[in-house]
Amino acid sequence: MSLEGATVEGALLHLAFTLSVRGTPQLHAGEEIGMEGKDDPDSRRDFPGGFPFDNRSTFTTAGRNPVHHRIYQWTQSWIRLRAEHSAIRNGKLIDISYDDDTYVFARKDEKETVLALSIARMLRDGFKFQCVRLVWQMTSKLER
């Protein structure tokens, strides 16, 4: 959430994309809760919690504000999805459809095919992301 004009929806879309495309996902410190910051050195703020002198801890549900908690839950669900589906971790990436507003792709390995969809829409008040997650599995028998 460090970019000018960043939105929660944009952060969610970024996290879903990062955790579902090829390669090892890398999240910047605090990205899993949507921490804000600007250019260095502001981009590396201390993570709230984990030290005795911190007045709150975002390691706990009670220490997160509603936005932090929403982004945290979203991140956890995508990490869990990646752990549960070998195609997301190791499968080849197949681009199905894309334009300025939509990206549809599949991840496929020998066990499964997972389909992912993301949508970004232009609204009158500016650019806003609408995050949509669709996971669809097909068995090898159905694919042949």
Image (tube, rainbow, N blue to C red):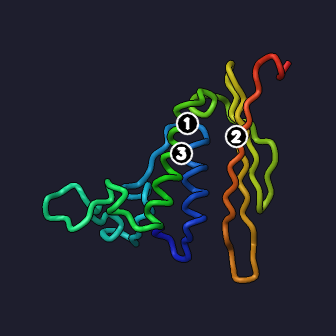
Secondary structure state at the residue bearing disc 1: helix
Residue 77, disc: 3
Q: How many labels does the image show?
A: 3
Amino acid at circle 1: Arg
Give the mark nearer the N terminus: 1 vs 2: 1
129 w.r.t. 103: above or below? below
Residue 82, disc: 1
Q: Residue at x 56, y 30 (%)?
A: 84
Estimate the spatial distance between the alpha carbons at disc 3 and disc 2, rounded to whole Å. Answer: 12 Å
Secondary structure state at the residue bearing disc 2: loop
Residue 91, disc: none
Few, some or many C-alpha atoms within 10 Å of disc 3 (few <14, some 14-19, many ≥20)?
Answer: few
Give the mark nearer the N terminus: 1 vs 3: 3
Q: Where is residue 35 in the image (x, y as percent from the top left)?
A: 40, 65
Left or right position of 45 against 90 = left
Residue at the extreme bottom? 125
Disc 2 target residue: 135
Asked which quadrant contains residue 50, the reply is: bottom left
127 w.r.t. 19: above or below? below
Amino acid at circle 3: Ser
Asked which quadrant contains residue 20, the reply is: top right
Q: Residue at x 77, y 56 (%)?
A: 102
Q: Nearer the viewer, residue 86 or 24?
A: 86
Residue at the extreme left? 52
Q: Where is residue 49 in the image (x, y as percent from the top left)?
A: 25, 59
